[in-house]
Image (cartoon, helix red, strand yellow):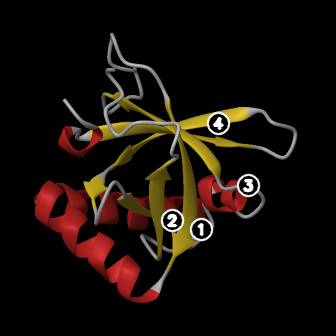
């Protein structure tokens, strides 16, 4: 099974001091070995990507528990907007369907409760496995 077959992937970004922060994300294949997902421009993922493009990815479940028998794949990631974000958004909606509407509604409700508006899915992230890595994390 390749990363493109996965519903969730554990994305690990790194703080300035090198501390890893892992988050499960929805995941869609793009051209070549690249993958994408969307997030908020105010998310920790975007803030950490501002200072380092290094990430790792690994198949997981919705709660972030990694799939047995897999190992992390080294990759680089960059935040995107414009046409690349539009492409990611349409692919996520196609793959995850109604769940995208549910998560958007929950995000809006959470913002009302916290009395803090947070943009929803206004940044895309393009992830590219590095040459030493593999798009097939099970090997």
Q: Is residue 44 found left or right of 5 in the rendered image?
A: right
Please tell me whether mark 4 or mark 1 is closer to you in this view: 4
State the residue in front, 103 or 38.
38
Dot 4: element: strand
State the residue in front, 23 or 78.
78
Image position, residue 120 (x, y; %): 44, 71
| Contact, mark 1 vs mark 2 (Cβ under 8 Å) | yes
Image position, residue 23 (x, y; %): 51, 39
Q: Which residue is mark 4?
A: 21
Dot 2: element: helix
Please tell me whether mark 4 or mark 3 is closer to you in this view: 3
Q: Return the mark for residue 115.
A: 1
Q: Earlier in the sequence, mark 1 or mark 3?
A: 3
Measured Cα–Cα span from mark 2 to mark 4: 23 Å
Q: Return the mark for residue 52.
A: 3
Image position, residue 118 (x, y; %): 55, 70
Measured Cα–Cα span from mark 4 to mark 3: 13 Å
Dot 1: element: loop
Q: Which residue is mark 2?
A: 111
Q: Earlier in the sequence, mark 4 or mark 3?
A: 4
Query: How busy is the neighbourhood of tag 3: few (under 14 within 10 Å), some, or many (20 plus)?
Result: some
Measured Cα–Cα span from mark 1 to mark 3: 31 Å
Q: Earlier in the sequence, mark 2 or mark 3?
A: 3
> Residue at 12% of width from left, 65% of height from top?
94
Image position, residue 36 (x, y; %): 37, 60
Query: How busy is the neighbourhood of tag 1: few (under 14 within 10 Å), some, or many (20 plus)?
Result: few
Please tell me whether mark 2 or mark 3 is closer to you in this view: 3
């Amino acid at each position: 099974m390749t990363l493109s077959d996965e519903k969730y992937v554990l994305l690990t970004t790194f703080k300035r001091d090198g501390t890893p922060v892992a988050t499960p994300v929805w995941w869609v294949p793009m051209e070549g070995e690249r993958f994408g997902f969307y997030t908020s421009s105010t998310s920790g993922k975007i803030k950490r990507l501002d200072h380092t493009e290094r990430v790792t990815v690994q198949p997981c479940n919705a709660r972030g528990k990694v799939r047995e028998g897999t190992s992390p794949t080294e990759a680089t990631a960059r935040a995107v907007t414009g046409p690349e974000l539009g492409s990611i958004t349409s692919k996520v909606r196609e793959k995850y369907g109604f769940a995208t509407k549910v998560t958007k509604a929950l995000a809006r409700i959470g913002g009302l409760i916290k009395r803090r508006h947070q943009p929803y899915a206004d940044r895309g992230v393009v992830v590219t496995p590095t040459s030493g890595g593999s798009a097939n994390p099970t090997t």
